[in-house]
Image (cartoon, coloured by chain):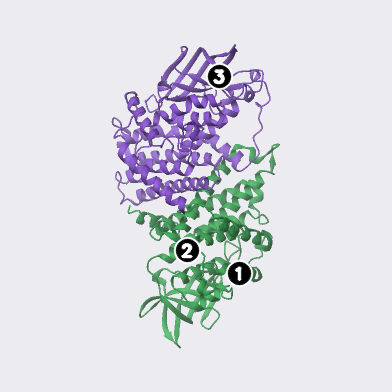
Chain colours: A green, B purple
Amino acid sequence: MNLVLSPEQQELRDTVRSFLGAVSPLPKVREGYDPDVYTRLNGELGLSGLIVPEEYGGSGAGFAELAVVLTETGAALLPGPFLATTFAAIALTRVPDKELLTGIAEGRVVATLAQPAEEDGLAAESADGGVAVRGTLAQVLGGMEAGVLLVPARTGDGVVLVAVDLTGEGVTRTPLETLDITRGQARIELDGARGRVLGAQPQDGGIGDRLAVALAAEQLGVLRASLDSIVAYAKIRVAFGRYIGSYQGVKHKLADMHCKLEQAESIVRFAAWAADESPEELPAAAALAQAYVGRACFEVARDHLLLHGGIGFTWEHDAHLFYKRAKTDEVLLGPPRIHRARLAQLLEL
Amino acid sequence: MNLDVNLAEYRRTARMWLEANTPADDAREADGIARAKEFMARLYDAGYSGITWPARWGGQGLTQAEERAFAAESRDFTLPTYVFSIGLGMTGPTLVDRGTDAQRERFVRPLLRGEEIWCQLFSEPGAGSDVASLQTRAVRDGDDWVVNGQKVWTSVAHHADWGLLLTRTDVDLPKHKGLTMFVVNMRHPGVTVRPLKDMSGRANFNEIFFDDVTIPDEHRIGEVNDGWSVAVTTLLHERLSISSGVGMGTRRDDPTALDGLRRLVDTTDPLVRDELVELHIRSRALALFNQRLAQETKAGVFPGARGSAAKLLLAELTMYQADLATRLAGPSSVVGEDNPLSQAISLAPGMALGGGTNEIMRNIVGDRVLNLPPEPRVDKTVPFKDLKVGTQA
């Protein structure tokens, strides 16, 4: 088990961190998705192709590297469809498709992945050499920005993974008002939308587990940046003639938040390692990652906002951006209890 | 890669040795001392005592990786090493770091081989978290020092041959600047060891009285009035040894851990299941953090004050586990002779108090990991004799 970053991974981390600091600082984050930043992220750093296998033009890196990158994009609250496209790439590493993987690696294709519960799943029937897809998805991450939607759909041959062209006929996309102003979701109605069958939808949970690990890596970044922000403020803000960080009422809370960071980081490294090296440990590691890191991220983001005092409650201050991203992430893959229920099941309780 | 292979081989050999040599029962009690010493001698002769200590003074000269590997393997066994834990975890490393060559030559090897038992004499009734306000006096008398005062919370002192003793040697200096460290012979006339029952009803520690006890100057560790810096060395080792469990003789079947608890409770109850899931989450989170610290140490990144975060988390987990286990088990958890759950809930606060309270750990994490501004201090520059110390009405 490897829980420590290699020198190469540290270099990747530093590169992504300084790049995002330069091209996507917090004042810019408030303006939302900037396709130019996204293009540079993929062009200059090749991040969209990070986990795409080399045969499809990607870097063929593992989850250890992906986690490093997502921690930085999370810490920067990077707006736009990077996480959505990463989710799609994760699905495509399980159900490979040359055209899409190549497009994602080159930064041409912005994609997203939906995982509707089976009862309200979509239906696909053959049409013009592809399929026509029908059904409604209430919330799709990056649904307005993505050009391609990957989604499981029912056919006569069972449930398959379908790539739907979101720019074509039969697609109605409605942007949703989201708590997190930095990253959008959309309602998508498909009424005979053109799709292509990529293959049978894997039933082993391998995609869902990897999404959980990837999201936990982003949450680790949000957690870390929240803590960094309030620690920095506690060193300059004075009350009653003292820096607020010198009061035990503040210092002890920050120490507890640091303990959460240490444990969250350890869990993310473990879960990323399991995704790369230890498939039998992955399900429990992934559920642990969401159960612990998702909660810890929100708690730290919440306390970082509260410790800022009144200024943290204002629109102008950035604290609420972290708080809202943390909450949105915590429920992104479903109500958090599903991860705890999964753990109970895996522990055979 | 090659290192990993060697380490795996080291672990395998260690495990085989442990399986062949670990005695069946716990030797914490007084009648077990002889057996504990015999075990320690075998442990030393097999090369598993003082794994990271310099070979010149009797150690093995290996790395933290081997030490952690051995600790990990020994977690499945109950090693009768409890009476040596203070020497191995705290006073011994202090001697190695700060002692003279003559002191290292005299004390380190017998300590590692279990021939001599050590205790640590820092805390006093009036000086716990604020140990630098201690009042036990050492006064110079020719080539000797004469000690008077009282120490408390001293684990294994009733078995100890030697103690690492922090004293006040100058009351006209500020509190941290008038302290001096000594090695004291616990068998010396004038040393009185009185067992102190802890809240579990057992006398796991003692209070010690010093009445005109003489110590030769050659048993002084570090310079006169520089005892605080020596004590800081000891305390750093203490936190690390607690968080890594080195030499602590950990228990094989912890009834408050998930594996023990799941056999006691109705796991079809969804509320119980969720409590057990929470226990799993917290236990795994800390275990992975400790593993990461171990791997960082192996890679040359010393954990330093981050060890205090691990110690704080262990204290909280210990309390949480015992509390949860008793709540889940219900009324049966609080009755019966030697009920392991009653013992667990009685012993749990100890982890949050010994080796620095949770509040002190949070101060350390805040000050030294997060580099937060220190609290204003009123006691750092005033001569000790003008300070308020202890409990004042």
Q: Amino acid at mark 3?
A: Glu
Please tell me whether residue A147 is drawn above or below residue A273 in the rendered image.
below
Q: On the same chain: label 2 and label 1?
A: yes
Relative image position of residue B239 (x, y in whole percent):
50, 35
Q: Which residue is mark 3?
A: B218
Q: Which residue is mark 1?
A: A42
Q: Nearer the viewer, residue A4 or A30?
A: A4
Q: Quadrant of residue A181?
A: bottom right
> Label 3, label 1: how many angstroms apart (C-alpha)?
68 Å
> Label 2, label 1: how many angstroms apart (C-alpha)?
20 Å
Q: Which mark is residue A286?
A: none
Q: Is residue B391 visible?
A: no
Q: Amino acid at mark 1?
A: Asn
Q: Residue furthest bottom?
A: A128
Please tell me whether residue A325 is drawn above or below residue A52 in the rendered image.
above
In this rendering, the label closer to the viewer, 3 or 2: 3
Disc with the residue nearer the chain's start (2 vs 1): 1
Relative image position of residue B14 (x, y in whole percent):
37, 42
